[in-house]
Image (spheres, rainbow, N blue to C red):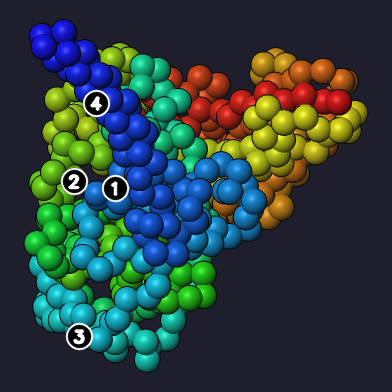
């Protein structure tokens, strides 16, 4: 009887292990895909977080739409989730109110529905998570493991905040140095507040649509306060309150999060941080992730691809904060010893990305190509992006390198 019990026990243990293994595989298979988490999203999007929703655009999908990034494949970086808003369909503006206050002469509130009857403005801009490229830092900083797909090129349409204030007869005080926006807290959502410098008012947009369609709920619909040239986190979704303030707000999303070190008491040159080192972020020794850093991506060839030679077309996009134009993009096939000038598709200042192209003569075999952009302010990309290493992995802008084969 003891042997029988032992055999039975061992058999049951084996069955249990098998079931556990099968169950483990089943659980892995049951992890929701992007389209299951957010209605209308492409199932290939990489889910980095289920709650709040964070999704990255696979690079092959991103480059397949070089002009404008459709809502179905645009990345998502939500810091909060609003119940019922995980869809690319528009959200109802009916009854949605926004307060405007702080350092203004006449505080007021308005319903978003009234914005549709006002003159509309449009801006095409790069929308990018400030953590995009985080995995390229070494050692890898904390946070969602973004590769290069936390970015898109989109067109927002809506009412200019500056014009709306003027139409209401409202003026910010001279003491107002920042615009502070609050997201909705429907469904007991956590507080989300961001401040940007007052000069962002020049191009600020109360966005109602994206790429010619109602602003997707998951991307901030029915109304998002958009600041062209600024990292995505500053473009507050589901905005319900706009304040003009003398200082930056001090909630967690402003400090210590979304900041990089600077020389204390200035917002001047980036202060390099020793890789792997911790940093005590505060308002004096760091700056917020505001303006988009200069960057360029190679859209073709792709990593590991085999292309026909000997004449190889290399193309991609470049972008910055839109304050000055992109003036050149250079490509190199010898590790940066020499550079070849690419042709830019457009000239002049823009908040959108600029497409570029070059044709190179390359012998059969393996090659590595690099691309770097320059703008009219004399800014360029570092060959080694790790010089800007920071604890949370923000603002990566090192030159992109792609290895491929010429047949």
Could you classify mark 3 by the number of other residues whose Cα lies within 10 Å: few (under 14), some (14-19), or many (20 or more)?
few
Mark 1 → mark 4, Cα distance in angstroms: 30 Å
Q: Nearer the viewer, mark 2 or mark 1?
A: 1
Q: Quadrant of the N terminus?
A: top left
User: According to the image, label 4 marks what residue?
Assistant: 16
Q: Say the numbered circle drawn on residue 223.
A: none
Q: Nearer the viewer, mark 3 or mark 4?
A: 4
Q: Nearer the viewer, mark 4 or mark 2?
A: 4
Residue 297 found in image quarter: top right
Q: Say the numbered circle drawn on residue 253.
A: 2
Residue 333 found in image quarter: top right
Could you classify mark 2 by the number of other residues whose Cα lies within 10 Å: few (under 14), some (14-19), or many (20 or more)?
some
Q: Say the numbered circle drawn on residue 95.
A: 3
Work out whether residue 326 or residue 252 is closer to the camera in this orientation and state it.
Answer: 252
Tell me where residue 16 appears, x and y as whole percent: 24, 26
Tell me where residue 20 appears, x and y as whole percent: 27, 29
């Amino acid at each position: 009887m003891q042997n029988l019990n032992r055999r039975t026990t061992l058999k049951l243990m084996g069955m249990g292990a098998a079931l556990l293994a099968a169950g483990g595989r089943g659980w892995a298979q049951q992890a929701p895909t992007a389209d299951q988490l957010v209605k209308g999203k492409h199932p290939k999007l990489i889910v980095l977080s289920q709650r709040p929703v964070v999704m990255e655009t696979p690079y092959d999908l991103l480059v397949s739409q070089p002009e404008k990034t459709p809502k179905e494949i645009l990345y998502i970086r939500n810091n909060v989730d609003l119940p019922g808003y995980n869809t690319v369909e528009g959200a109802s503006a009916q009854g949605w109110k926004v307060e405007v206050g702080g350092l203004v002469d006449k505080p007021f509130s308005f319903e978003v529905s009234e914005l549709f009857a006002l003159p509309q403005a449009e801006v095409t801009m790069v929308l990018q998570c400030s953590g995009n490229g985080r995995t390229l830092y070494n050692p890898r900083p904390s946070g969602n493991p973004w590769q290069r797909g936390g970015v898109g090129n989109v067109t927002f349409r809506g009412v200019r905040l500056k014009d709306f204030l003027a139409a209401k007869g409202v003026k910010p005080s001279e003491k107002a140095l920042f615009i502070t926006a609050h997201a909705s807290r429907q469904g007991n959502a956590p507080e989300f507040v961001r401040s940007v410098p007052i000069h962002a008012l020049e191009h600020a947009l109360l966005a109602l649509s994206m790429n010619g369609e109602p602003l997707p709920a998951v991307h901030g619909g029915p109304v998002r306060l958009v600041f062209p040239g600024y990292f995505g986190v500053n473009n507050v979704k589901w905005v319900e309150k706009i304040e003009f303030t003398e200082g930056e707000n001090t909630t967690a999303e402003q400090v210590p999060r979304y900041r990089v070190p600077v020389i204390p008491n200035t917002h001047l040159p980036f202060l390099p941080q020793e890789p792997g080192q911790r940093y005590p972020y505060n308002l004096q020794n760091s700056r917020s992730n505001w303006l988009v850093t200069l960057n360029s991506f190679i859209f073709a060839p792709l990593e590991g691809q085999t292309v026909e030679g000997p004449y190889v077309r290399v193309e991609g996009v470049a972008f910055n904060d839109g304050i000055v134009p992109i003036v050149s993009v250079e490509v190199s096939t010898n590790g940066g010893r020499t550079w070849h000038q690419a042709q830019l598709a457009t000239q002049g200042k823009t908040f959108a990305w600029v497409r570029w192209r070059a044709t190179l003569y390359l012998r059969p075999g393996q090659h590595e190509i690099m691309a770097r952009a320059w703008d009219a302010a004399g800014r360029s990309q570092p060959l080694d992006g790790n010089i800007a290493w920071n604890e949370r992995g923000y603002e990566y802008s090192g030159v992109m390198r792609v290895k491929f084969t010429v047949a």
